[in-house]
Image (tube, rainbow, N blue to C red):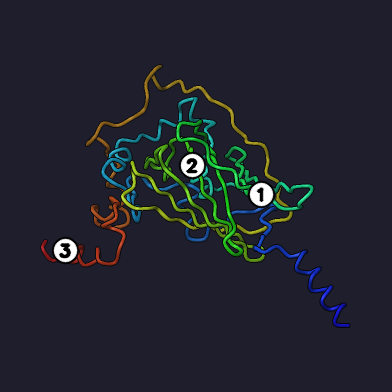
Amino acid sequence: MRMTLAWLLALLSLATPAWAQVDFSGEWAPRFWEDQPERVPGPDLGDYLGIPINAAARMRGDTWDAAIQTLPEWQCRPHMADYIWRGPSNLRISKEVDPVSRTVTAFHAEWLRSVDRVVYLDGRPHPPEGALHTWAGFSTAKWEGDVLTVTTTHLKEGYLRRNGLPRSDKATLVEHWMRRGDFLTVVAIVTDPVYLAEPFIRSTDYELNIHQQVPPYPCGVVAEIDRPRGVIPHLLPGTNPYLHEFSDEYKIPFDAVRGGPETMYPEYREKLKAAGNAR
């Protein structure tokens, strides 16, 4: 009997990997909750609340004109790997399995408004710094318990928010994928030496939906006839008439919505109180 028990324990040890492997494959539907205004209609112009941007990013945001999305090259532009989690799109995750070892060697993530994003788990290195940058970037991952930590490099320039705040092509993305039953939570950390003074952290939730199908990307370029040919929509520094609308509507001090690390922490409340008393 002891020999039988020992044999069963040995068999179980062979069948169970030394590290946890969570299956992320399936159809996932976004859950917006309080993030609905951010992720569906999009943020207000000039709303940089809680984002550790620097002066360069603030200038890019202040001079951004939403009409730039009327350009043909923008109309079918997919969301980048770091932003697509925050979009309103459904998600499909599939997996590649080695036929011999039976281990998962890669996950594929595909949203409605994205390209196929491959996350490699086979230990391959990242390409050289000068290699091709893409919308999805180059992603590798490792298991940390039952959390999958993904590191992404080689991203094309993109945006932190859909109101003009930029993210450079020198940025790196670290994600932590966590599954609890039918819920998927992803914590994304963007580090950008060009436009961020500190790492920018966001978390996003999805729920498993076994009836979901991700349709083809419904995109077709439309020629705009009310914009002169060759004109790139933009606003010169200091000329944007819409920057105060967000702070005025929600009665938030204008300096507070300008973003930056100094506005992100509780101590900033004391500064606002002092400024109010001074007036």
Q: Secondary structure at mark 3?
A: helix
Write down the residue under mark 1.
Answer: 93
Label 3 is placed on what type of residue? Gly
The tag on residue 257 is none
Is residue 38 found left or right of 122 in the rendered image? Answer: left
The residue at 66%/66% (across/down) is: 181
Query: For mark 1, does the 10 Å Cα neighbourhood hold few (<14), some (14 to 19), or many (20 or more) residues?
Result: some
Bin the neighbour count of mark 3 within 10 Å (Cα to Cα): few under 14, some 14-19, many 20 and up: few
SS label for mark 1: strand
In the image, what residue occupies the spot 52% across and 60% down? 33
Depth check, mark 1 against mark 3: the one in front is 1
Q: Quadrant of the C terminus?
A: bottom left
Local packing at callout 2 (Cα closer than 10 Å; few below 14, some 14-19, many 20+) is many
Looking at the rendered structure, the kind of residue marked 1 is Ile
The residue labelled by disc 3 is: 276
Residue at 29%, 55% (x, y): give it: 261
2 or 1: tag closer to the N-terminus: 1
- The type of residue carrying mark 2 is Thr
Quadrant location of the N terminus?
bottom right
Q: Which residue is drawn at the image coordinates 21% and 63% (left, top)?
A: 272
Instruction: Name the foreground residue: 24 vs 97.
Output: 97
Closest to the observer: 269 or 115? Answer: 115
Percent across and percent down for residue 245 are: 30, 47
The label on residue 153 is 2
Of labels 3 and 2, the one closer to you: 2
